Image (cartoon, grey):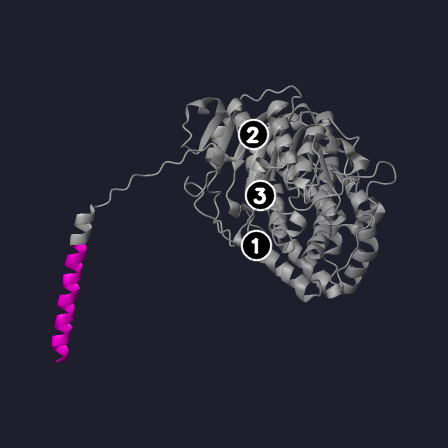
Amino acid sequence: MITGTIKSQVDQIWNAFWSGGISNPMEVIEQMTYLLFIKRLDELHTVREKKANRLGQPIENLIFNRNQQKLRWSHFKDLGDPGLLYHIVSEEVFPFIKKLGGTHGESTYATHMKDARFTIPTPALLARVVDMLDAIPMEDRDTKGDLYEYMLGKIASAGQNGQFRTPRHIIKLMVEMMAPKPSDVICDPACGTAGFLVAAAEYLDQHHRDEIYANKKALKRFNHDTFHGFDFDSTMLRVGSMNMLLHGVEDPAIENRDSLSESHASVEDQFSLILANPPFAGSLDYESTAKDLQAIVKTKKTELLFVALFLRLLKAGGRAAVIVPDGVLFGSSKAHKTLRRLLVEEHKLDGIVSMPSGVFRPYAGVSTAILLFTKTNSGGTDQVWFYDMQADGYSLDDKRNPLDADKHETNNLPDVLTRWQHRDKEIKRARTEQSFLVPKAEIAGNDYDLSINRYKQVVYEEVQHASPQVILAELKALEAEIMRGMDELEGMLK
């Protein structure tokens, strides 16, 4: 977590942008991202420079050549002339980063930077922001990542069109439940700012670092072939691409793509792991939606179409952990029932984690669940694991204040992960507990209803009440006491 000091520094930069004339939160994020990207390029070049000097060899993967030294952050940040700084950054540095990767096999960043614009309006504002960013200590990747997450959390416009930023702790839980491996090919078909891909990269770096850095081939696979993200919002693609860079993934496959459209219907059986929180709201025209998705489930609802898409994109044996609105679990339409039957009968439905409705506040109070399944094309569902999450470590109101992370009453997430990892032992748990297993036959008998309330048993505590005679006697005694008090008060008044 970033400290209060760094949060204060970021808040000051944010306020500087607003007072300097940039009031759109996404535009602030974009402009800060470009500057952080420029700063990161200089850091990468410095590391390669030191390694080359140590080995007495030429710099590997040169970023700045001899004639481009003035484009480096470490050079222009100390110029002292706001006008000259503004000219160099806007007229030379910004065009330089837009062209990174060259014309042959352009990098993800260069692809999404084509339409980028440098919109910081004045030399004074740029000089001030450069000084402020330079003062923030960002030596390690965790600080960079936390700082970036804090900035993204400031996007007040989130929640439009059914798109909500997934809380980082929920993303982390889902990644840990899936436990990705270096051999996985990971996809988020509605990636936004790439939060799921970033968390997966962090998990792999933490748990499989030796395998990732074993040789150049393994490292190249991690940087270029492991992570795939799709989105049709060009701003989100730029932010997501640079979010990945700031977390140490050099060139993920983040593409401008409407995942549900007919034009991308040919993409299938490619990924071994899907992590996603697709848009909930809205519906599409049958004509614009991929025909093969309509063949799976005839619907206009995006939340159902995305689940069908996940099944199409996964390889056989591929796994998914995705967030869905509760309606997907119990909706009574033919499309809802068809999709649930498909998951249970033709693939392997592993589990459902029911989440409290406050998880997405302040953007929405919608009730959601984590859907966990494996694509098999041959069934395999035996017992479905259910967990009734009641607390996620934060208050469930609009403030979302952090609560005691070590108490189960206020944070169920560690328990969710532990029980998931040992769910083969859950068979002994009663339906009155927070998690339990439900046989496939019972689910099928309930028209494939997957809502936890259908199967959870509620225990009502027996309350002992006094007999009517005792209650009447107590009322009489109370009435007599009131009358005595009134007599005393009347006497005092006389």
> In terms of sequence position, does the residue under pointer 2 or pointer 3 come before the other?
3
* Residue of label 3: 168
* Residue of label 1: 7
- Viewed as shown, does residue 391 lie left or right of 305? left
Horizontal and vertical percent position of residue 171: 58, 39
Q: Residue at (49%, 37%) from the top-left corner?
A: 413
The one nearer the camera, 26 or 441, is 441
- For residue 340, the mark is none
Which three-letter amino acid code belongs to the residue tagged 1? Lys
The one nearer the camera, 132 or 396, is 396
- Marks 1 & 3, CB-CB < 8 Å contact: no
What element does badge 1 sit on?
helix
* Residue of label 2: 447
Which three-letter amino acid code belongs to the residue tagged 2? Asp
Dot in front, 2 or 3:
2
The one nearer the camera, 76 or 168, is 168
> In terms of sequence position, does the residue under pointer 1 or pointer 3 come before the other?
1
The one nearer the camera, 257 or 116, is 257
Which three-letter amino acid code belongs to the residue tagged 3? Arg
Secondary structure mostly taken by the magenta-highlighted segment of the chain: helix
Residue 490, magenta (yes or no): yes
Viewer can see residue 139: no
Residue neighbourhood size for the residue with mark 3, other residues' Cα within 10 Å, grouped as few (<14), some (14–19), many (≥20): some
Residue farthest right in this picture: 103
